[in-house]
Image: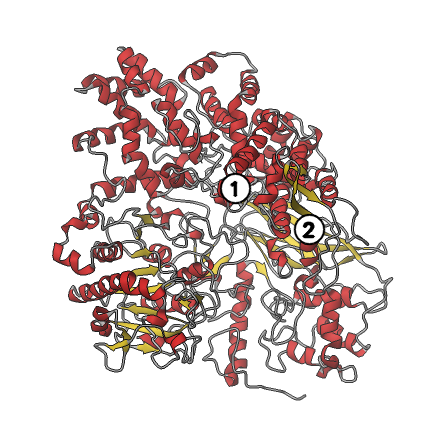
Amino acid sequence: MVVYLPLLPYFPFGKPSMRPASMRIRLAGSRFATIVLMTAFGVALPCGPRLLMASNAEPVTSRSGQWNFQNDIEPILGKFGCNSSACHGKAEGQNGFQLTVFGFDPQADFFQIAKDGFGHRIAAVAPEKSLLLLKATSAIAHGGGARLTRDQPEYIALRDWIAAGAPWGDADDPQIVSIDVLPEQSQLSIHSSLPLRVEANWSDGRRTDVTRLALFQSNRPSFAKVSEEGVVTAGSLPGVAAVMASYLGQVDLFQAIIPRGDVTGGHSTQPAKNESLGDDNLDRLIERRLALLNIQSSPAASDATFIRRAYLDIIGTLPTAAEAREHLADQRPDRRARLVDQLLQRPEYADYWALKWSDLLRVNRQALGHQQAYEYYRWIRQSFAQNKPLDELARNIVTAKGPVKEVPEAHFYHAVSQPDQMASTVSQVFLGVRIECAQCHHHPYDRWGQKDYFGMQAFFTQVSFQSSAIGEAIVSNGTATTTHPRTGAEIFAHALSQPLPEQSPQGDRRELFADWLTSPDNDWFARNLANRLWAHFMGRGLVEPVDDFRSTNPPSNPELLAALASALIESRFDQHELIRIITASAAYQRSGDVNATNQDDEWNYSRYPFKRMEAEVLLDAVSQVTGIWDKFEGVAHGTRAVQLWDSNVSHPFLVLFGRPVRATVCSCERVGQPTVSQVLHLLNSPELQKKLSHQQGYLASLVLGTQDDVALLQELYLTLYCRLPETEEQQFGSDYLSQAPNRRQAAEDLVWGMMNSLEFAFNH
Amino acid sequence: MSGYRRFCDGMSRRDMLRVGTAGLFGSSISLPHLLAAQAHASTATGSASAKSLIVVFLEGGLSTIDTWDMKPDAPAEFRGEFNPISTSVPGVQICEHLPRLAQQMDKFALVRSFGHSDSGHGSADHFMLTGYRPLSGFNASLKPNNQKPAYGAVLSRQLGPAGSVPPYVCLPQLHRSGGSSYLGTAHSPFVIAADPNSPQFEVPDLMPPLEVAPSRLESRQQVLQAVNRFAHKIEVQANRDANAFDTFQENAFNLMTSQATKHAFDINREPDSLRDEYGRHSLGQSCLMARRLVEAGVRCVMVDHINWDTHFHNFRILKDDLLPKLDSAISSLFRDLHYRGMLDSTLVLVTGEFGRTPKINKEAGRDHWGPSTTIAIGGGGVQGGTIVGASDEHAAKPATAPFEPADLAATLYHSFGIDPNTEFLTAEGRPIPLVPGEGRVMRELF
């Protein structure tokens, strides 16, 4: 065997000081360490021959007698890392050998291996001398090290395939249909292991075990790791992790549930399927998960807590002391549901949800112009004021046509003015999927390719603005085409995961997209909206970030997400209805109390989280409790911060507390995390002190009008905390007021303290 | 050891066992750990001479062909209007409009073979300030916009502050790529959004308003303690954001009451003559402030100075406005650090996001030019007076082995003795190394 050691001028995977002569020794050392580390890391990357035992695994190929490149060879390229995005699968390939990541284009891979450069990579007459195999076994210097040894079945398969003339296969060879990971879900004790099995379903009806060549990845390696062979090992922490198995472009999930303490039930559990969502079913799905985790949920929150929480979550506004009193006095058994119904009808509801959707639909005064942005906003607000079904809202936006004066939602297409932006924005907002990566190459973490990206873009290439008798109008017509940047082939409009159509759809393609988007059979839309609403109310979505659905980022509780999505569809996308369902659940009505079992639970809704109020909501809250409101530039007096349609209105408080810039639709633009500067601002800002001490302020009149300390304190507590003070709090407050030389200033100090407390700034 | 598996952004899979969990991620958060000054540096590699970092970022892109890396022999349409002058280092010449810097040339070094392929605002800034090119989905308008942490955030995480001061400070505004990304809010910068040159300069919101007397502040603190029923409770510790708020509040009081911090932020304590020397402008006083803060124990100060994007009237603006400011500010900084014996322990980096075009444009200006720029770096163990590498005759590209932002990152951490193989976990549990895989230490500097 000829061993060929070229001098590599640049060793791409390490420091250039490495000398080729020492490379093989160095690789051997590093390879072993890398194997150990990669296993420890829990993302099972194929790395070397030693760990893959050719034990009693089923035959490598799934062929029924004939070679088929896609079925027989592609999985090997995937399993052994050849086509990973780190090596030959990256957009520019590696050292002149370019494969497609995830094997998304088997024909291209076949060409590279068998035909490129006069087929120099393979040698049918002497298969073991094929460059492909020499490199793969590191018989020749190979930047990727030795991926195979000559005794492995996969090496033998490659060799035999080459010897057979490297056939592509026949058109009627079986195709893969899907894969199943078994079990689907299981409890695992801490540090215990469970081997997974992956079975493939083929179009000829066969079912084969493909565990050996499947790729495994854990989405939470700190909770559960998975080895290359598909053995899941739980870490030392209770929690949930999802392990993805992929094979030939198919993906399936296993859920590892690692309970606190020992596993109580049996190993395998069957998740509920197709449960329709009544009020208690949502909780049942949550409770079932918590039971598997041995986590107990916290008890229900008090009325006072629920009232404040519901106000903030539904209308982004604090209750006034009078409202708080009124609700606290309500003793009817259905008082919480009644409160929710009331809030849904308040005008502030439209303000708040218009604010949130203005972020998503990019109401940007600088980009659109003052009048236009305002009208766009008003249309959005009106949609929520009349509780327009969300599918109709989406359809209105996507298919907006006609004179912009009459169809202000068309401004969406000014905010995102290029077809590629339109496609990725619509995808991110309405599907919760980020497809931008796929513009230039195959998406590294999901299954979207350029074909999918440009298929989406093709829906929007007909859009343009034209002058009409009634001013500017948006039209969408014509036969604009989209071509694949790499292959030059024309890509007809088709939605994500839909098959490529044979010809370009006729008419306004956006209508077709809107049909697909809002169809009851389309999971994406309903799941995305349901997830966003759930995330808003519960503090954490089932998928996080909420606009990052992908196969490598599965929902933490798939059954719950499916149930919420179904509920939304059944209600015909009625946001009010989903809000009623969510707020009626025990999960939403839970307190944030921590018990012995749930301190570390962030993902399973066993306790209610603390959420920092959004910038606009917090500013309004501060204004409301002090009675002194800011006048914002460019809008009428009395406009509250949540009513600001321009996210660029100058106000340092809003910037400081993370108001979005609306340059993109990313959920990351609005920052909910606290900073030291925010804390200092609440403590020391002169503006806040002015509000506190203002002569016309609420505090001034309250102190003047209420001589009784008890009554004063009650009023303050109801105003800021939506509850009555406890005995010790009453005592402290009364003492403080009576001992202070200046009663008014003492009251200011009390309010200052309350405003700076966690109970105020956080929705809990 | 170096791993050989990479993502498309050039990162490699590395030693999982050396992962440090970022402050706010991981399953349990304990109060004392959140902002504590913890030394997380693993095996010390490199000189470990540097203890603090000052980054002076010239936003817009300093024209290095007119300042640090002149080409007097090039044709007129390249060489520009300025002439070089000799410096305190024989054989080294810089622009005639930086005479004081020329005298301090022995305190710092220039890397003239620096460059990168990004000539766009926003992304180039991120590249220079983190060592990492931003990836698809980068939204430059966010503030901060970091996909990877800025150097100061990393130093805050690995070394913490030395004292009750914040570990990482940005002034007079936050540069958009100065954030902490997945290192979390514990390591995001303390922003002084105020111009130290202003007569009314004070750190915003650091002290209560005037009408609140100190004794009243004390009473208020008592009130807060009494009414803040969730403070330090387990319910709060179990929620990241609430826990952060709680800890920041504790820290805020430390900041407010610490004499050391108050002194450090009080620029008026500096003698007028020194303030004059640095220059009575935003850049000068910010550099003085930076020295002051480092002295008080701040681990990294980033000074963001704007208006360097000289597409029009490059020479007039540089000569009349920007270069005198740069000259007084940076020369004073080096001289002052040296005088106080702080130069060895303080690494100073002066750079913009890219260089500027070799060919002068129609408006007597220069446009963006990533492929060739010069960075100035001194202190922290760097050999003063060193010139590393060279660019070609038009300063269009490096003529010797090129260095790029990943190398800058490697070099910075090297001088702090921080292991370049250190990795952090993102929220998704993905390990990201401190330095992009291909980053090499610029050893010629030491």
Up the image or down, A442 lies above or below A32; here it is above
Quarter where residue A58 is shown: bottom right
Q: Is A241 positioned to the left or the right of B211 in the image?
A: right
Up the image or down, A118 lies above or below A175; here it is below
Image quadrant for the N terminus of chain A?
Answer: bottom right
Question: For the point 66% across and 80% down, which residue is it?
Answer: A134
What residue is pinned by disc 2? A461
Which residue is farthest bottom?
A2
Q: Nearer the viewer, mark 1 or mark 2?
A: 2
Query: Residue A386 versus residue A650: which sits nearer the camera?
Result: A650
Q: Position of residue A446 (x, y in %)?
A: 64, 54
Q: Position of residue A28 (x, y in %)?
A: 54, 76
Q: Chain of mark 2?
A: A
Whole-angstrom CA distance, mark 1 to mark 2, is 53 Å
Up the image or down, A28 lies above or below A345; here it is below
Quarter where residue A50 is shown: bottom right
Q: Amino acid at mark 1?
A: Arg
Residue A270 at least partly seen: no
What residue is pinned by disc 1? A260
Q: Is A581 positioned to the left or the right of A306 in the image?
A: right
Give the mark nearest the N terminus, 1 or 2: 1
Q: Pointer 2: residues within 10 angstroms few (<14), some, or many (20+)? A: many
Q: Position of residue A188 (x, y in %)?
A: 59, 47
Q: Is B88 positioned to the left or the right of A652 in the image?
A: left
Q: Position of residue A254 (x, y in %)?
A: 65, 49
Q: Pointer 1: residues within 10 angstroms few (<14), some, or many (20+)? A: many
Question: For the point 48% across and 30% down, which residue is it?
Answer: A643
Q: Chain of mark 1?
A: A
Colour mode of the rendering? secondary structure
